[in-house]
Image (cartoon, helix red, strand yellow):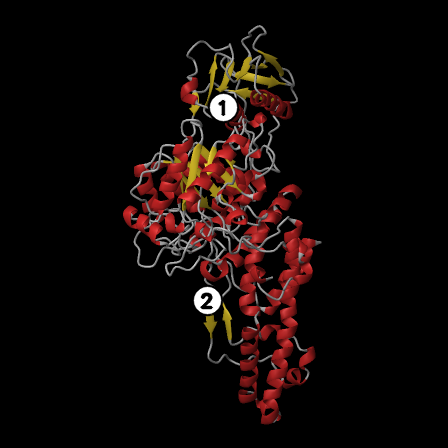
Amino acid sequence: MKIRMLALLLALFCTLSFAACDTPAPDTDPTGTDAAYEEEETTEEPIVINEDTMVLAQDKETEYVIVRSVDSTDAEIKAAYDLHQYISKMTGCRLRIITDDQPETDYEIVVGYTNRQSDGQFDESALGDEGFVIEHVGKKIFIAGSDTHGALYGVYTFLDEYLGVRFYSSEYEYIPKKPVLVVQPFERDMQIPVFAYRDVDFVTSRVDDYQAKLKLNGMYAPGDASVGGRVDYVGGFVHTFNNLVPPSVYGASHPEYWGMNPDGTPQPEGGRQLCLSNPEVLAIATESVRQLLQNNPSADIISISQNDSGEQLPCMCKNCQAIYDEEGAYSGAIIRFVNAIAGEFAADYPDVMFDTLAYRYSRSVCKTVPADNVIVRLCTIECCFSHPLGTCPDVYGKPGSDNTIADDIRAWGAVTDNVYVWDYVTNYAEAVTIFPNFNTLLPNVKFFADHSVTGVYEEGNYFSETGDFSDLRCYIMAKILWDPFMSEEEYWGHIDDFLRGMYGKGWKNIRAYLDLAQELVKDTHFGIYDRAAECLYKNQLSKRSRDELPDTLTLDMILNYETTDWSPYLLYYRSYAPSELVSRGYELFDAALAAADEDQAERIGKIKLQLDFLNSYTLYANANKDVLYDNIEQLLINFFDDHPDGAQIPVNEQKSYIRTIREHAAERYLASYEEYNRELYQRAVWYGITMIHEGDADISESKDQMNFDRVPREW
């Protein structure tokens, strides 16, 4: 019913000439492939079994057992159990799990560190907490890693890379059915992560143990022992100044604890900063950190970071200004402040790190070097995301400055080994439409790895479900955070594998849509707050000074305007050229849906929302009252001037007809646009979307207050 309803609405808009339906689709996509892909034939490679083949299961029978340590941790127990479960689902064969105090056989899958390996076979110190080794000795397979993350990550990698399981999303995993499950001999596989901290933050990724399956360990990964815990921020993830020095406690009695403007007036309360040159502020913040450490013995990181204040500057009192002058950067006061607190606790808490931001005004490196237990977390908020880091100016860079975020990453990496990056991978202004940055994800993360970055937080659409490719982003970003040095071929191979697995035989159509979006921004600098319909897809105004008067318009139609269909004339005088991504996108999504099964169609329906929302923005360009007025008014003026029957309407009545008919046409067809948006809203809520942009109200609870005659960001 929903699809049928949308089809009717789209047909209506085609008759109104609002949409791109009358524009011929290009014969080829930007990559030169066919306009509509044929359904893909898939054939499985024949199973080869020889004397070296490891046959894990055949016809629900097996010689293999899974071995874990007799004193396994919760994470090792989960690793062994999950391996058992997935093989059972694949083959119908249930491998027994035994402990290493039982007799050894030649047919074992050994999980974690056990007594099965000889001394020195696995360098535990080199692998650390998260690295692992997958290898075989004869028919015996070892998945060796630590009792926190290593063994677990090794098992999930073995399932993925060796057995063909795919952890595509928190809601869908691909588990192949294999009555005969074999592993051919392979080279020793040792994997150690490049980044110590890896986090991808979408609503869809904050589910159960999904992040562990993607080998993510950040703040929003599960913290329980069964998945080895996580890198845990205590006392707040970011923007913690007000947590450490609470305004509710000190605001009224000590206004001097907070920032001053250059003219000596207090900064406004919203986003004001601390006065970091005030020794009492340092003492209070230090005591707050002490309490956090005492109350949270498992803390990994304490954030001591500036408030989120937009473009507002830090405290500009004379004492703070003196520090900035000495340091050559606003960051100098922050690094001195954080160093002092970190130094206070370095001896008693040697494993705890203290994190601060290089964000907006504090981006540039200062003269004081961060202490060894201090992390500088640089934010890419001003970046262009349609081009790789360092290849173009920042979209929101400071006027007159040649310095870029890429320069700042290089500069901080030159003075400290503890650089984290807070990266952005969604459109915060129009969060349901596509953010076309797939061409920059890999090169940007590789740039981080090449310049001493040791931790990356990818902030996606954390505030709502979305029609954009959130599941794909979680999947592919986890891959590149684990291996930032993969080739472009590997990167796009992972994307293609995901699209095929999630969306079925017509997946290449969705890839063509993704490629087209990338093609359309190759010459555009695009940031996280830019509006897709206005900046990205360049609706071009087409204005005609005096079109040939349509033969179909008659005097009787004007006199009986209320029963006349005005839709053929609504783009008579001027219009906006339709978005290529919309016209081509519907063709591609329709082809993908035609080849999909029911479950795949449901998943395609969710990502197709990005196109439907973009269409709403582009429809409004031609559905707004100004455009409708201009077209109807010019049409009638030309009729009265040029048509033989035009003189039958007295001149003093012509203006009245113009005003009345344009009001009638606008009211009637704006109602059609409103109906399109109402139906779009219903499907968005169905798929769990609660916000159109960051900071928006919950649309699922605000239907009666929505303005559906406006574009979605203004609902």
Q: Is residue 7 visible?
A: yes
At 50% across and 60% down in the image, what residue appears?
533
Secondary structure of residue under mark 1: helix
Q: Residue 99: percent from the left, percent from the top?
A: 59, 12
Which residue is under mark 1? 150
Circle 2/circle 1 CB separation < 8 Å: no
Q: Residue 112: percent from the left, percent from the top?
A: 52, 18
- Please name the amino acid that badge 2 sits on: Gln
Q: Is residue 107 above or below residue 199?
A: above
- The image quadrant where one finds the N terminus is bottom right
Q: Specify whether 109 is left or right of 124.
A: right
At 65% across and 67% down in the image, what residue appears?
672
User: Which of the marked residues, 2 or 1, is nearer the chain's N terminus?
Assistant: 1
Which residue is under mark 2? 540
Q: Residue 336: percent from the left, percent from the top?
A: 35, 41
- Please name the amino acid that badge 1 sits on: Gly
Q: Residue 634: percent from the left, percent from the top?
A: 53, 81
